[in-house]
Amino acid sequence: MSNSLVAMPAIPDIVIGRLPLYLRALIYMKNQGQLTTSSNELGRRLGMSSAQIRKDLSHFGEFGKQGTGYHINYLVDQLRQILKLDQEWRVAVIGAGFLGHALANYNGFIHRGFHISWIFDSDITKVGEDMGGVVVQPMDELEETIAREGTQIALLAVPAERAQAVTDRLVKTGVQAILNYAPINLTVPPDVQVGYSDPVVQLQHMTYYLDASRS
């Protein structure tokens, strides 16, 4: 009889991507004073089937009971642990322009497990400026700071023509997760996670469904 361990099947990334949506809805209900919920209620709130929600959560265990549904506080805690949000993640912002300034001053990060700790920019007129309580550092200090602090997450708010070069620098220093706001696709190693936030792409997606004759 073999003693080798059986590899667990990988959880699809699309499932991981839905967990923050569940968490957000649950936290909203928790803040409204609600104690329990069901997959049917979550489905109605999120425009999804209850079966999909149950299937997604089943990848990580059994969290609800038939007849009573889910205890919201418990499920929130479990999802936070699964997403590794039961700790604070320190984040670097690259780019101190209008977008970088907005990111540095956005108070939604700190309550969700993220703390903007460093901001870098190549514009010497911005270096030394205080943004949301963080002093902008020169790009020359990027590698040393990231490596010293063990930073794993970066928000990329630089022009498209600079995004790949900056990404290469981040990857070399050990950054493993990059949220890119530049309108360009990045090339990274397989073990580096990249997310994209481009409002133009989202608008282009939605205009497919609109009536062009009314514009």
Image: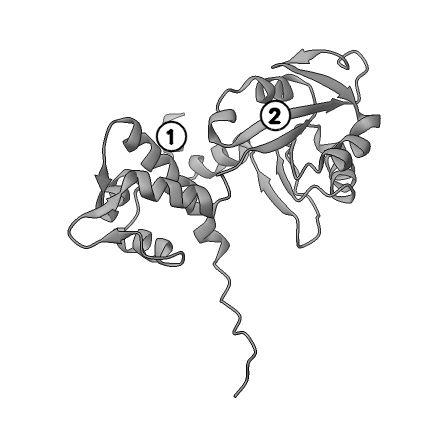
Of labels 1 and 2, the one closer to you: 2
- Residue 164 occupies quadrant: top right
Residue at image coords 32%, 30%: 28
Is label 2 in a helix, a strand or a loop? strand
Residue at left 40%, top 32%?
212
Q: Residue furthest right?
A: 140
CA gap between label 1 and label 2 equals 44 Å
Give coordinates of residue 62: x percent, y percent. Answer: 32, 56
Instruction: Identify whether 107 is placed above or below 148.
Output: above
Residue type at mark 1 is: Ser
Q: Which of 26 and 84 is in front in this view?
A: 84
Q: Which of 95 and 132 is in front in this view?
A: 132
Image: 128 above or below 58 = above
- Within the image, what quadrant is residue 145 found in? top right
Q: Dividing the picture into quarters, in which one does residue 97 lie?
A: top right
| In-image side of 48 versus 17 (left or right) | left
- The residue at the point 28 percent across, 51 percent down is 49
Q: Is residue 22 visible?
A: yes
Provide the secondary structure element on which disc 1 rests: helix
Residue 124 numbered mark, or none: none
The C terminus lies in which quarter of the figure?
top left
- How far from the left and from the top, in percent, is residue 73? 31, 38
**The furthest residue to the bottom:** 1
Tell me the residue that label 1 is attached to. Answer: 213
Instruction: Give, as a three-letter code, the residue at label 2.
Output: Ile
Q: Residue 116 carries which label?
A: 2
Q: Which of marks 1 and 2 is nearer the N terminus?
A: 2
Cβ atoms under marks 1 and 2 closer than 8 Å: no
- In the rendering, at what x and y percent does residue 36 appear? 22, 40
211 lies left or right of 188: left
Q: Measured along the vertical axis of the image, is residue 71 above or below residue 98?
A: below
Residue lying farthest left?
Answer: 67
